[in-house]
Image (spheres, rainbow, N blue to C red):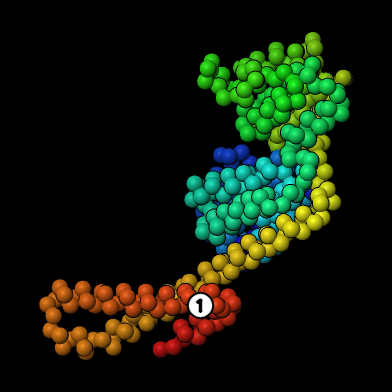
Amino acid sequence: MNITMAGIDHSKADVEIRERFAFTKSAAEAGMKRVREEFGATGCVILSTCNRTELWLDGAEKLDAAAILCQLRDADLAQYQSYLVERQGKEAVDHLLKTACGMNSRLFGEDQIIAQIGDAGDFARECKTAGPALDNLFRTAVTAAKKVKTEVRLTAVRQGAAESAVELLHREWGDLSCKRALVIGNGAMGQLAARNLLAAGMKVAMMLRQYRHGGASVPEGCTAVSYDQRYAVMELADLVVSATASPHHTVHADRVQELTHRPEIFLDLAVPRDIEPEVGQISGIRLWDIDSLGVSGLESANAEAAAQAEKILKEYCEEYEKWYQFREAVPLIQQISRKAAEDMCARMEKCIHTLHLPDAQNEKLWDQIDHHAEKTVARLLFGLRDTLPPELLKDCLRALNMVE
């Protein structure tokens, strides 16, 4: 398989390093198109989440995925080489399937990554950069992860960063019903955080960049306020959560320093980070980021459940590998089918000539013979896919293609 990937994630890099490689949606689109046009990959997908950034390539045997990822982010490869991981072929496929299940997440077994991988594949398809192999791979990863989630309970406690944050808050404050929270960001993570804080009994205000009375989409129970009012609302809050996709800071240390009443805890769920790190240096304030919220690795999960998940994923991985290898045989099948059709037409020429058909009927008959001969042979050869191992199939097809 010519599939390769390069990535950086929470296992080797903290949030300060990871944010250097994060992509906004517009940057991902520009990057994927650049890879297709400038570097010649037949497929490209960029996956960028809070915990990881990965560049996926297909049809790029001579391309250095890590070097390309660094070029896309204007980063020095030598400086960041130790944080980057590269995978190829079956190892890469296995990695994506496990990642989709949350088995490579900081919060083992978390569910949000399924949607993130699905969205990355959908977006690359929309941008016309995925190519057939990566399109199929990302679809397979989502399908496999859903099967695992249906049949295996990978974790009994944490399902994501928002839930983990609430656990930490309970340990810090105990009862949360008397606490007030401000959530900046109305995307999926912001809404998830707001719902979990509401469920814990907190009073929650949600910031919107453009608030229209009666038209804003906020979780039921939240108070919606304008983004421009965030520092005024902060005066009343005990907790500030920021979870936007903005490439710029949403909370600045100098403005927080000016507040008469400062929230006790700031929680930054974004990558790149929303809250200036200097906020954590202000007296009386604790700043948590995405790295503060959980543990990683298989050791946090039930070993038996992990083994069950890997068994399911192995089946999907093998099926995808079989599909990919057969896909490489398709041009051979097409060549053999064309040669068979040409041979059939040559053998039928004398017979058809004796019929003395009108030109129109004669041309139509030749088209039908050519078409059906090619389709029949192709159908027979495609049928071998279910009975022969991929390598043996390709050997047989190569031999047939040499027959004159």
Q: Mark 1: few, some, or many residues within 10 Å (few <14, many ≥20)?
A: few
Disc tally is 1
Q: Residue 74, relative to residue 139: is it above or below? A: above
Q: Residue at x 68, y 63 (%)?
A: 314
Reading the image, the residue beneath label 1 is 384
- Name the spot of residue 94 as percent of width and height, x first: 69, 60
Amino acid at dot 1 = Leu
| Residue 199 visible in the picture | yes
- Name the spot of residue 209 as percent of width and height, x first: 59, 22
**From this viewpoint, which residue is outermost toward the front?**
151
Q: Residue at x 68, y 49 (%)?
A: 149
| Residue 207 visible in the picture | no
Instruction: Give the left or right position of residue 16, taking residue 371 as reference.
Output: right
Q: Residue at x 75, y 22 (%)?
A: 201
- Name the spot of residue 301 as percent of width and height, x first: 81, 50
Q: Residue at x 70, y 12 (%)?
A: 232
Q: Secondary structure at mark 1?
A: helix
Q: Residue 346, relative to residue 286: is it above or below? A: below
Instruction: Give the left or right position of residue 392, taking residue 362 as reference.
Output: right
Write down the quadrant of residue 292 in the picture: top right
Q: Quadrant of the N terminus?
A: bottom right
Q: Residue 287, relative to residue 260: is it above or below? A: below
- Name the spot of residue 111 as percent of width and height, x first: 68, 43
Q: Quadrant of the C terminus?
A: bottom left
Write down the quadrant of residue 56 in the picture: bottom right
